[in-house]
Amino acid sequence: MEGAQAVREALAFGTVRELFVVDPERHAELIAAARDAGARISPVDERAAASLSDTVTPQGLVAVCDLLDVPVARALAGTPRLVAVCAGIADPGNAGTVVRVADAAGADAVLLAGDTVDPHNGKAVRASTGSVFHLPLARDRDAAAVLDACRAAGLTLLVADGHGELDLHAPEARPVLAGPVAWVFGGEAHGVPADLAAAADHRVRVPVHGRAESLNLATAAAVCLYASVAARRP
């Protein structure tokens, strides 16, 4: 992962094995922390840093870390109350932003189901602004099995769907939102796959009161997750 913020979070909450750095003086504090954590420090020139980077403007600081994901069962261990499920999200920026929103809302885990992008993707890590290190992440290509695991953990399955039968702001939605829930979010273009949406307990729509065609994925995820948080408050 790349950049000072991501490296800082990796050192605080993950395991950094090696740190490649162009300007040691500029990043002296991070280098000292990485060295204290047992990481190998490798000075490189700008050309080498560019070859390691996937950004247009390399930041000159790249860390090699242990993988972050855990088995689904471990991510759902205990008594989870709020879980975000990314189902078929192909854009790494969107996936990383959902992780960031879930972290901000106090979610217990983020599950990446089906053909969702790898959370270790550089763009996903950057979009999460370090949140990939803050809560359990789990991946499983079998999306139906992920939903089954959520249900077995006592979570009500809520699919965010612009045409859902349950209005997020309807009075009858509040007791549903206040319980243990797993919110399922799909890709920007096609939403949650039809078979997964049909298997959920509720398909919930965020009402659009103006003339906007719809909400983007990150905004919808924030509204839905925070609605669950608000519903639990007296």
Image (cartoon, rainbow, N blue to C red):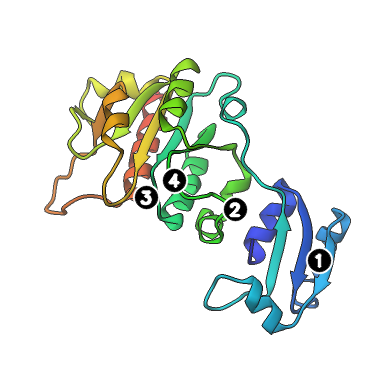
Residue at screen point 61% across, 41% down: 69
Residue at screen point 32% across, 30% down: 196
Name the secondary structure under disc 4. Answer: loop
Q: Is residue 48 above or below residue 69?
A: below
| Front-most of residues 67 and 28 | 67
Q: Are marks 2 and 1 in contact (CB under 8 Å)?
A: no
Q: Is residue 23 above or below residue 112?
A: below
Asked if residue 184 lies left or right of residue 17, the reply is left
- Residue picked out by circle 3: 218
Three-letter amino acid code at the position of disc 1: Ile
Q: Are marks 3 and 2 in contact (CB under 8 Å)?
A: no
Q: Residues within 10 Å of mark 3 (few under 14, many from 20)?
A: some
Name the secondary structure under disc 2. Answer: loop
- Viewer can see residue 168: no
Going from N to C along the chain, the mark reached first, 3 or 4, is 4
Going from N to C along the chain, the mark reached first, 1 or 4, is 1
- Residue picked out by circle 1: 31
